Amino acid sequence: MSEPVTISFAKHGAAPSGVLLVLTDETLGFGKETQKLLKPVLDFVARAMEADRFKGKLGGALDLIAPEGLPVSRLVVLGLGKVAELKSTDYLRLGGIAAGKLPAGTTAAMLVADLPTGKFSPDAAAEIALGARLRSYKFDRYKTRKKDDETDPVALTFTLSVADVASATRAWADRAPVAEGVLMARDLVNEPSNVLDPPEFANRAALLTSVGVEVEVLDDADLSRIGMRALLGVGQGSIKESRVVVMRWNGGLPGTAPVAFIGKGVTFDTGGISIKPAAGMEDMKGDMGGAACVTGLMHALAARKAKVNAVGVIGIVENMPDGAAQRPGDIVTSLSGQTIEIINTDAEGRLVLADVLWYTKDRFKPQFMVDLATLTGAILVALGSDYAGLFSNDDTLSAQLTAAGQATGERVWRMPLGPEYDKLIDSKFADMKNTGGRNAGSITAAQFLQRYVEKTPWAHLDVAGTAMGSPATDINKSWAAGWGVRLLDQLVRDNYEK
Ligand code: BES
Ligand code: MN
Ligand code: ZN
């Protein structure tokens, strides 16, 4: 139902139509191009700013209807705050705010990328475009009726007026695939579990062949031959088959070790025999947010032809409590050979990841592994939804992830690991148990994963608080965030290309 948004660029001087968006700062000044365009209404705009006590603060907006003398239906003045202090993430946010100011049914909008002081970089223009694209996303596939005040969806062309069309277009061409990856991840997370079961998730991942990703789908028979019994144990209480999908993008030098991304893909988590309470259980359709991110990321890397060898491996299962389901007290032998006593069948994500991490490490000998998982409710208690938890055995990788988090606004906060925590998952009957008790729940989960990575540089991102259900932001109004695609794309860009 929601129509695509087309981003386009036009050279300064092009005539606006539809909604015109212009930028000002705390001095309430306008750039040269904006002044030219607003000439017939400059006085009117100045009076409107005054009357509305509009101060040009970052994030503020003044919305004016059909000013006489301009060929547009609306004029929106957006605040930049202090131009000298603007960061990349501010431009991203501005793009989101701009798109949010467009009334339903808008078919054309033009934002004049022009500063009161200094030059507008092509990257800043492309960040605005990215913010506008991400903000315009809606998941309304299953809405068959619209409310009285809703219009039929229309296609929107969002044009940025820039000094140099070629360089802005190039900057956007590098980001458009990342936007697509984020939206792909959001779609996967928003999709209900009766539609997106493990085989269907694998089918969707297999579509990445269209951008040049090699995709391998392993089914129940393959997984049992390989020996992924920890993963299969989680899926055995469901009538749905389990899947592992291996996605490979070879854009780097032949023979260089790949970077590896691993995702938890529990298409629905009832908790299994250790069943969850009913309230809020519907949110567990999003328990595959890690796998969705890895899929979106692999799309982004391939579609923008990143100069890197990358593999994405996702473990996809449904955690259900039928007669064949795994029980507390069961002991399973993981692919690594290590045995696990199941204490709580609701601590299933780590069982899936244990096998997928070991498999990825053994088969690909990657430069590093980063896993993403909606792993613990405890990470929400610790960090809320503003930071993902970062756990790592490698200071360099941690620093790179932290820097990428600052650059993209998808922030991570490093949490401790150590032998004190590790011993909390020792078991009476097996090599380890799958839970470590009430305290430090996110850390003991990470300790469990660490037992499956050996010496490989590794980072685990607990995204239970960030992948879905976070409060709306300027660049996302949807339940699913598509969190991590931009973060990991940035990690690769900054450190692992060529
Ligand atoms: N998928 C959940 C974690 C989760 C909670 C994700 C809230 C998103 C929002 C995970 O499988 C789980 O159930 N974890 C348990 C672990 C416990 C049994 C040790 C938890 O956090 O309670
Ligand atoms: Mn669970
Ligand atoms: Zn789960």
Image (cartoon, rainbow, N blue to C red):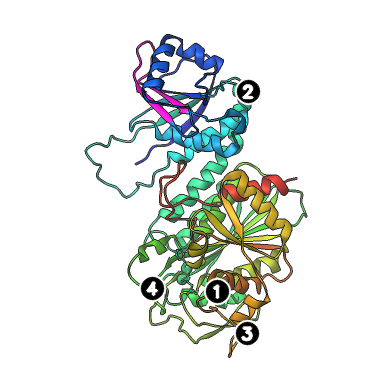
Instruction: Give yes or no for residue 485 being in the magenta stretch.
Output: no
Ligand 1 contact, mark 4 (Cβ < 8 Å):
yes
Q: Which residue is mark 2?
A: 119
- From the viewer's side, name the closer residue of 276 and 419: 419
* First in residue order: circle 1 vs circle 4: 4
CA–CA distance in space, label 1 to label 4: 18 Å
Q: Amino acid at mark 3?
A: Asp
Q: Residue furthest bottom?
A: 429
Q: Amino acid at mark 1?
A: Leu
Q: Looking at the picture, does residue 115 appear above or below residue 349? A: above
Q: Which numbered marker is on residue 471?
A: none
Residue 388 figure quarter: bottom right
Q: Which numbered marker is on residue 351?
A: 1
Q: Are the residues tagged 3 and 4 within 8 Å (C-beta)?
A: no
Q: Amino acid at mark 4?
A: Lys
Q: Nearer the viewer, mark 1 or mark 2?
A: 2
* First in residue order: circle 1 vs circle 3: 1
- From the viewer's side, name the closer residue of 478 and 334: 478
Q: Which residue is mark 4?
A: 276
* First in residue order: circle 1 vs circle 2: 2
CA–CA distance in space, label 1 to label 2: 52 Å
